Image: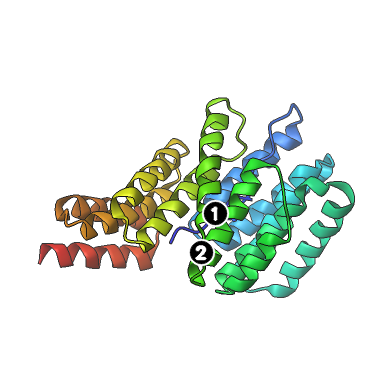
Amino acid sequence: MKKIILFVGIIALVACSSLPKYVDLQSTKDANDAMKRAQNAEAVSYYPQAQLLFEKAFDLYTSVDNLKGIIISGLAVARQYYYLDNMELYDTWYMKMSVIAHNNAPDFIPLLYLLQMEVAFDKEEYGRVITLSLAVETSQKEMQTELFSYRLLGLLKTGQPYQNEFEKIKHNISGLRSMFKKNKLDDPKIVSYAAYTLGYALSKEKQWGKAIEFFEVAHEYDQLIENTSGLADDVYAMGVAYENLGDTEMALSCYIRARDMYIIINNEEMSAVTEAKIKNILE
């Protein structure tokens, strides 16, 4: 399923992180640019390139003591080292960001938990994901929605009720979409991921028609921000739903589109999966 690469990944989360808002400092503008390029590299699993770009952003934010940028880019560096299987440097960067967040920027402490949850989820330690999600609270709607999303997925994976989390995410999506329209949303990918999460949960319940409605919302926002990786996952998920509804023509169209996007982002595993889906329908 779709990986979150936000503070993400979502985030991205990403891992997933929100980009610091632009200010008039050239160093911050350059750092924001490096963050965007790093997130693009991370989205297609180019972790060595992403790591270098996130470290460049970290150095630029550090040069002007931009605490938000320091913490977000520093945790992003830690995340790259995790996916590069360098746990020593992951721990080093994580602990450094933990010290700064706890002493200088407590509003960003939830990001520390979100990174731990991403790692636990990747390791399929779903019980730990749930425990971590219950250990921190935030009124910041983006981080809050990411926490709810991880908790829902952890509960789903362990066969526990998740209706409460489902309703909270559904409620938050409305607010997040309103924030997006007012240009007050740091990272629109959270709308996409939240909607995708609800669609994924409904798919597991075989509520295919309702699942498609949420996948379409995810698709809308991934399209707005040109998130090819997310779009491929959205369209593939719609293909699965349409196939289960017996609409093979729509399913075939979705699989073809998803396959072509997976090829563009060099996702060989999913391009092979979609190719097999296409052949199965055409046979």
104 or 93: nearer the viewer: 104
Label 1 to label 2, Cα distance in Å?
8 Å
Q: Residue at x 54, y 66 (%)?
A: 155
**Is mark 1 in CB contact (under 8 Å) with mark 2?**
yes
**Disc 2 marks which amino acid?**
Pro
**Disc 1 marks which amino acid?**
Asn
Determine if residue 240 is in view.
yes
Which element carries disc 2, helix, strand or loop? loop
* Colour convention: rainbow
Badge 2 crowding class, 10 Å Cα cut-off, few under 14, some 14 to 19, many 20 or more, is: few
Q: Residue at x 56, y 47 (%)?
A: 168
The quarter holding residue 83 reads bottom right
Q: Residue at x 32, y 56 (%)?
A: 207
242 or 48: nearer the viewer: 242
Q: Residue at x 56, y 41 (%)?
A: 172
- Furthest-left residue in view? 283
Instruction: Residue 151: give x, y in percent of width and height.
Output: 58, 60
Location of mark 2 (residue):
161
The quarter holding residue 227 reads top left
Instruction: Residue 33: give x, y in percent of width and height.
Output: 63, 40
Q: Is residue 83 left or right of residue 231?
A: right
Location of mark 1 (residue):
164
Q: The N terminus is located in which quarter? A: bottom left
Instruction: Residue 123: give x, y in percent of width and height.
Output: 57, 74
Determine if residue 260 is in view.
no
134 or 231: nearer the viewer: 134
Q: Is residue 68 left or right of residue 194?
A: right
Which element carries disc 1, helix, strand or loop? helix
Above or below, 282 against 144 in this view is below
> What number of labels is visible?
2
Q: Is residue 197 left or right of residue 122?
A: left
Instruction: Residue 117: give x, y in percent of width and height.
Output: 64, 64
